[in-house]
């Protein structure tokens, strides 16, 4: 991952604009799924449960790995795009339950701090997105080990495609599959077209007005090379927290109604979506120079 981060750092302006596109796609899509003895016994039970969970995880990883067709490019060690995309996509299938658990837990914890402790809220937002990335990487690593592919070779294959100018394809693909895992959280509310219009309009206003909390977090992220690439997904987390605060509606509730064919046939919805895309591009467009001036 470090090598990919270094490559992105060298191409910050292009990556910034591509990330804006990915963020816009993601945004629209999910608007579119007591005594020592007792302590020893408890610890032993926890260890046994952990061992069982690990065994189930590896068993699932083996089943998933069977679905993947591995091919290299000619005589090189680089894997073809189909192999890369399968590993990326199926790793989310392996990571789905961990994703659901950490998402629900972090949502509750960070929203409790949103109005009372901004510093702690920022930490929890960052922690959540880092945990998601680590969960996905853990799943990728497990699958790659079963396929007898080294993580370094896999990473080099991704870098090779990016160096050939395929930034957009890889970013857009990653954005799409990361939205797909969100379908694992079941919606709890049924929204109507008017509800959706109000929510998209609210998003648009947030991107245009740029509240101080968004400015603060993005500014901090932009100063660290290792977190620049997380800005689009973190913006999504922040925006959805604002939406929940205003409407008590979750991302999966929005995704459910966006999946209805009639929604994208609605002219008002289409116009609002286009405006959100433009607002996201405007916000992300100044990615150069360590994103200096991002929210000026």
Image (spheres, rainbow, N blue to C red):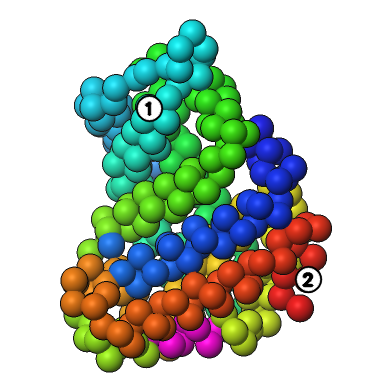
- Quadrant where the C terminus sits is bottom right
The residue to which callout 2 is attached is 293
Query: Residue 107 at x, y = what percent?
Result: 43, 67
Q: Is residue 24 above or below residue 66?
A: below
Left or right? Give the position of 162 relative to 112: right
Query: Residue 65 at x, y = what percent?
Result: 29, 25
Q: Mark 1 and 2 residues: CB-CB less than 8 Å, in contact?
A: no
The residue to which callout 1 is attached is 83
Left or right? Give the position of 120 relative to 216: left
Left or right? Give the position of 244 relative to 57: right
Bounds of the magenta span? Answer: 199-206
Residue at figure coordinates x 29%, y 22% from the top left: 69
The foreground one among 76 and 225 is 76
Residue at figure coordinates x 52%, y 55% from the top left: 129
Left or right? Give the position of 30 relative to 149: left
Query: Residue 204 at x, y = what percent?
Result: 50, 83
Q: Residues within 10 Å of mark 1 (few under 14, many from 20)?
A: some
């Amino acid at each position: 991952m470090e090598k990919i981060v270094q490559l992105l750092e060298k191409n910050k302006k292009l990556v910034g604009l591509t990330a804006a596109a990915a963020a816009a796609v993601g945004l629209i899509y999910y608007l579119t799924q007591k005594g020592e003895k007792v302590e020893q016994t408890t610890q032993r039970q926890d260890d046994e449960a952990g061992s069982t969970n690990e065994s189930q995880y590896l068993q699932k990883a083996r089943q998933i790995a069977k679905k993947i067709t591995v091919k290299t490019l000619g005589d090189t060690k680089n894997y073809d795009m189909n192999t890369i995309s399968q590993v990326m996509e199926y790793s989310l299938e392996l990571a789905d339950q961990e994703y659901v658990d950490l998402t629900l837990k972090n949502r509750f914890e960070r929203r409790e701090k949103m109005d009372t402790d901004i510093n702690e809220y920022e930490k929890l937002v960052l922690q959540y997105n880092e945990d998601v990335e680590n969960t996905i990487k853990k799943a990728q690593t497990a699958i790659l080990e079963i396929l007898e592919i080294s993580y370094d070779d896999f990473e080099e294959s991704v870098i090779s495609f990016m160096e050939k100018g395929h930034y957009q394809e890889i970013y857009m693909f990653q954005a799409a599959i990361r939205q797909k895992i969100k379908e694992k959280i079941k919606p709890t509310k049924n929204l109507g077209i008017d509800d959706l219009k109000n929510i998209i309009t609210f998003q648009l206003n947030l991107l245009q007005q740029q509240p101080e909390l968004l400015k603060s977090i993005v500014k901090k992220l932009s100063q660290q090379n290792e977190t620049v690439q997380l800005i689009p997904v973190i913006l999504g987390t922040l925006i959805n927290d604002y939406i929940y605060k205003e409407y008590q509606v979750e991302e999966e509730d929005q995704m459910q109604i966006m999946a209805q064919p009639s929604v994208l046939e609605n002219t008002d919805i289409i116009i609002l979506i286009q405006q959100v895309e433009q607002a996201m591009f405007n916000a992300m467009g100044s990615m150069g120079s360590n994103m200096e001036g991002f929210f000026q």
